[in-house]
Image (tube, helix red, strand yellow):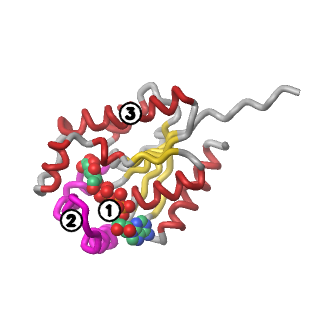
Amino acid sequence: MAASPRPAPVSVVVMGVSGTGKTTVGVGIAEALGCDFVEGDDLHPAANVEKMRSGTPLTDEDRWPWLRAVAGRVGEHEAAGTDLVITCSALRREYRDLLRDGHPSVWFAHIDTPREVLEQRLRERKGHYMPGSLLDSQLATLEPLADDEPGHAYTGQGSAQQTVDGLLAELADERPR
Ligand SMILES: Nc1ncnc2c1ncn2[C@@H]1O[C@H](COP(=O)(O)OP(=O)(O)OP(=O)(O)O)[C@@H](O)[C@H]1O
Ligand SMILES: O=C(O)[C@H](O)[C@@H](O)[C@H](O)[C@H](O)CO
């Protein structure tokens, strides 16, 4: 009997504004899938990190090299045939189109969290370079997923585990493993 074909790899891009829970939830999704987790923030050029630390929003020009680095990681996993979970704010449609270009494995998991909850989380979070003052620009830049983009938006209002489980259920529905 022929072995059943392996499912095509999936690259879950956990997206959303600062403080929405990308890292927390992304780690949980990667554990459940048993795959690599990559912190997309670690791929920012040092100049971008300094800019955010000083409270200045990034521009498109600042973000392009970073987005290309994120896409590069997706490409490496596709070439190896392995699943991946990677965090990347991916706030605008144009950014997501770049990530998806030539990368059919990409599936966007948008964590959509109300502003009041985000403010509270950013106030309580310690030891991170991203100041809460950048939340306005993050929310103003965010373009929600359109119907023709692969992925799903899920509320980040519940516990992190609820968000992990909700996104995994959508993924299982849309990209059966
Ligand atoms: N229900 C929840 N889901 C996710 N994170 C939560 C939740 N409740 C509290 N948090 C906390 O919110 C903070 C922000 O989460 P996290 O760092 O994962 O967000 P992020 O989207 O990766 O942020 P950034 O893009 O700024 O790095 C953390 O301190 C996390 O522990
Ligand atoms: O596109 C952006 O403005 C940035 O990627 C930010 O979203 C940060 O990387 C992240 O949120 C760090 O806290």
Question: Within the image, what quadrant is residue 112 found in?
Answer: bottom left
Query: Where is residue 94 drawn, in percent x and y?
Result: 32, 36
One can see residue 106 in this view: yes
Number of labels in the image equals 3
Q: Is residue 78 left or right of residue 66?
A: right
One can see residue 20 in this view: no
Q: Secondary structure at mark 3?
A: helix
Vertical relation: 62 (above or below) 157: above
Q: Amino acid at mark 1?
A: Gly
State which tag comes first along the sequence, 3 or 1.
1
Q: Amino acid at mark 3?
A: Ala
Q: Residue at x 17, y 52 (%)?
A: 52
State which tag comes first along the sequence, 2 or 3.
3
The span picked out in magenta is 114-142
The quarter of the image that holds ligand 1 is: bottom left
State which tag comes first along the sequence, 2 or 1.
1
